[in-house]
Image (cartoon, rainbow, N blue to C red):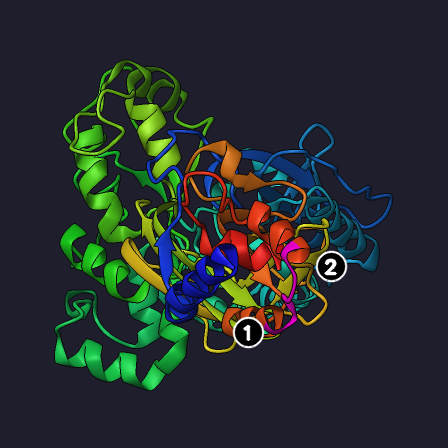
Amino acid sequence: MKKILAFVLTLALVFSAAANCLAAEKVQNLSYTDSLDSINNPGIGFYRPIGISLKESGNKAVDYNVNLVHLRFDIAAFSSNALVDKENNVYGKSAPISDDALKAAGETLDNVKKRGHMAIVRFCYDKNYGGAGNCEPDMEMLLTHIKQIGQLYTEHADAIAYIELGMFGPWGEMHTSKCCTDENAATALDAMLKATPDSLCVGVRRPRFIAAWMGIKGSEFDIENDSFKAAAEEKGSLMYRVGIFNDGYLGSSSDLGTYDNGITRDMCVRFLNKYGQNTPYGGEAIGGTEVSEWNSVNFVSKEGFLTHTSYLNLEWNYNLTQNAWVKEIYLGDDEYNGQTAQKYIRDHLGYRFVLRESRLPFAAEKGKNILSQISLENVGFGNITANEKITYILKDSKGNIFELSPENVTDPKRLLSGKNNVSAGLELPQDIAAGECAVYMRISKYGEYNSDNNYGCIRFANDASQWDSETGANYIGSFRVIEKKAPEMLLKKLANIINAEELEKYGNDFDFNGNGNIDILDIIAAL
């Protein structure tokens, strides 16, 4: 009887506590610091370039295994102004791009996606990107080519991180070309925007071409200028799809003439800061073996956040990226203090998410909702630019995997630089197993774990042990799944406990004969 009375008193004490315990949340025991790991997340970082010369027939796809590749297609063969065989003085022929060439380009993009990677893409008429100018066909044919290229980009949009317009001048850098007037560049930009889906952004080499596309003067390219505001309102959402590829990045105060025609660096930085939050920005950093005022890590660590810098060419300029930045040391008030400039810049190109806190309930009943709350800091220069989805992965005590797609969850593009709080109500499946359940947050291209091959999955920068490569998701903690609400279970069991033998069984489970400490969740699990 003493045991029975003790048990009854225990139940009385835990009834109210049990309900509160189930609903109570706890901060998960995880690593909440930046691991300093260099992570190959999609669409950002140092890229590797590869040139592909397309001809009328006999083209072959290229398979290049690198996280971010810069595909540089030349279509000199389809312009009568492009010298395609210098030795024999042979020029191309102005004609639509052949189906064979487009097929090879498409298969090359397919290969990028199959590898789980993304590409920055540019087309131009400079044979083998050798530095030749004035190679373009007439504008009518150039626009025909843009329409074809736009269709190619549309069909392979998921593999593309950014479209660099190119088309004009040596290396497609939109200079040293009689054809590359502000008017023609603006016309080409508008044509590419119309030929491609809203998910893709298009960059031009200089902001003056954006001003021409907007129909304003260079001196009016100021987000506070009335003419700019009126033109931006007329362009609407297209303003957020237009960007810059800066192949003179950090080369001087004007980035080697990138800012001209009355447009200052400050004007361009403020434009990118507002309209380029989800637009890729980068190019080729310029410098020698010693850093300057403009390409020092001190400068980049400030302006990079304003321009949302997301990618750079690892190979150009080699003296800067592989020499000067290796010797320079970053001094800051974050976890990267004391690291090389190269490592700091590489790891901060684009977005970089660090889990700073995660809260989950102690326990929850099958079929009910739990609330996941995390603090996620984006310490990177930029933000997510591609369309992504947030889902949650549950791994129950029997190893079953469930993917949940809660409503009203944060759009990943809104996880901007700085602290972000992400909450989601997760409805537990009825067939989830009782016991400890692991929870993961998954940011992916499609949000379909069972079929998407983890394409476009984004890893947080915390300790590598918190990354689950099987599901492409980030561990954010665990909770206990129970069959029913605790008070109901305890009451039913109490009614059935009528003899000392059965009570003894539960008494041992509850440690009545030990030190008397009773874990409510252990009681629930035992019953």
494 w.r.t. 474: above or below: below
- The magenta span reads 495-500
- How much space separates mark 1 and mark 2, taking CA atoms? 77 Å
The image shows residue 446 at horizontal and vertical percentages of: 64, 63
Q: Which residue is mark 2?
A: 97
The image shows residue 229 at horizontal and vertical percentages of: 20, 80
Q: Which residue is mark 1?
A: 491
Which amino acid lies under the numbered mark 1 shown in the image of this protein? Leu
Element type at marker 2?
Answer: loop
225 w.r.t. 458: above or below: below
Which amino acid lies under the numbered mark 2 shown in the image of this protein? Ile
Residue 162 visible from this viewpoint: no
Element type at marker 1?
Answer: helix
400 w.r.t. 324: above or below: below
The image shows residue 25 at horizontal and vertical percentages of: 37, 60
Q: Quadrant of the C terminus?
A: bottom right
Quadrant for residue 462, please give it: top left
Q: Is residue 374 left or right of residue 525?
A: left
Point 14% across, 54% down: residue: 266
Q: Nearer the viewer, residue 147 or 92?
A: 147
Q: Nearer the viewer, residue 164 or 487?
A: 487
Task: Indicate which disc, 1 or 2, sits on the residue closer to the N terminus.
Answer: 2
Point 50% across, 39% down: residue: 466
Residue 64 visible from this viewpoint: yes
Q: Is residue 58 magenta?
A: no
Q: Is residue 212 left or right of residue 253?
A: right
